[in-house]
Amino acid sequence: KRQGTNRHPSQSGGTRRRMESDEELMNRVAVGDGEALASLLERHSGRVHGYLLRYTRSSADADDLLQETWVRVARFARRFDAARRFRTWLYGIATNLARDWLRRNRTRESGLHGARGEASLAPPEEAGPGERRELQERVDGLPERMREVVLLRYFAGMNEAEMAASLGIAQGTVKSRLHTALKKLRDGYGVVQ
């Protein structure tokens, strides 16, 4: 035995793999690697579903949109630009599908003001059920473009640069929409910061 070769397998890097980035996984998805797609699904499905649930306020519709989002990720994997962040590309797909859903359903249900109310925006903990409902209605009542930035910021946890990339708009436009949306919410509610 050569001296210095009796290391633990995890120290040699032989059995311990570093966690691949989303972008590296997408490169594998692009060549048909189903395990890489499963890893991305595991990492991101919960938050994307929460975003879509708040957008649609329907668990069934959010499930359908989430499934279609991942179908498109797989279908268009070869088009993914690894210089971009996967997360912004993923939320861009989810947002576009949600916009299409909203357009289709606006005529049937007057937008998101239906009585389904499955999702809620979480106001301060001391807020009662009436205040929570009021805040949710105010968010739902925002124009679509403003509501998108509020949802991406507070429910997807994105910063302004990520929101701009996901929506395909300038960062200044994101700032403006977010500022206006929060002002509208503050004017009637007084707690959103």
Image: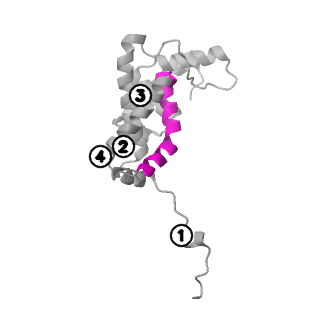
Circle nearer the N terminus (1, 4): 1
* Relative to 78, residue 170 above or below: above
Q: Is residue 116 left or right of residue 83?
A: right
Q: Nearer the viewer, residue 115 or 183?
A: 115
Q: Which amino acid does the dot numbered 1 rest on? A: Gly
How many numbered circles does the render carry?
Answer: 4
SS class, disc 4: helix
- How far, Cα to Cα, is label 3 from label 2? 31 Å
Marks 1/2 in contact by CB < 8 Å: the verdict is no
Q: Residue at x 62, y 74 (%)?
A: 8
Check the image and report above or below for 186 versus 25.
above
User: What secondary structure predominates along the stretch shown in magenta?
Assistant: helix
For the record, the magenta segment spans 34-59
- Provide the residue designation for mark 4: 79
Give the alpha-carbon distance from disc 4 to disc 3, as whole Å: 29 Å
Please tell me the numbered disc located at residue 74: 2
Residue 84, how many percent across, how many down? 36, 48
Q: Which comes sooner in the sequence, label 4 or label 3? A: 4
Q: Position of residue 166 (x, y in %)?
A: 38, 38
In the picture of the structure, the residue carrying the numbered disc 1 is 13
Among the 4 quarters of the image, the one containing residue 193: top right
Within 10 angstroms of label 1, few (less than 14), some, or many (20 or more) residues? Answer: few
Specify whether residue 55 is painted magenta.
yes
Q: Which circle, 3 or 1, is nearer the viewer?
A: 1
Provide the residue designation for mark 3.
177
Q: Mark 3: few, some, or many residues within 10 Å (few <14, many ≥20)?
A: some
Q: Nearer the viewer, residue 158 or 55?
A: 55
Of labels 3 and 1, earlier in sequence is 1
Q: Amino acid at mark 4?
A: Arg
Amino acid under disc 2: Ala
Amino acid at the residue labelled 3: Arg
Looking at the image, residue 136 sits to the left or right of residue 143; the answer is: right
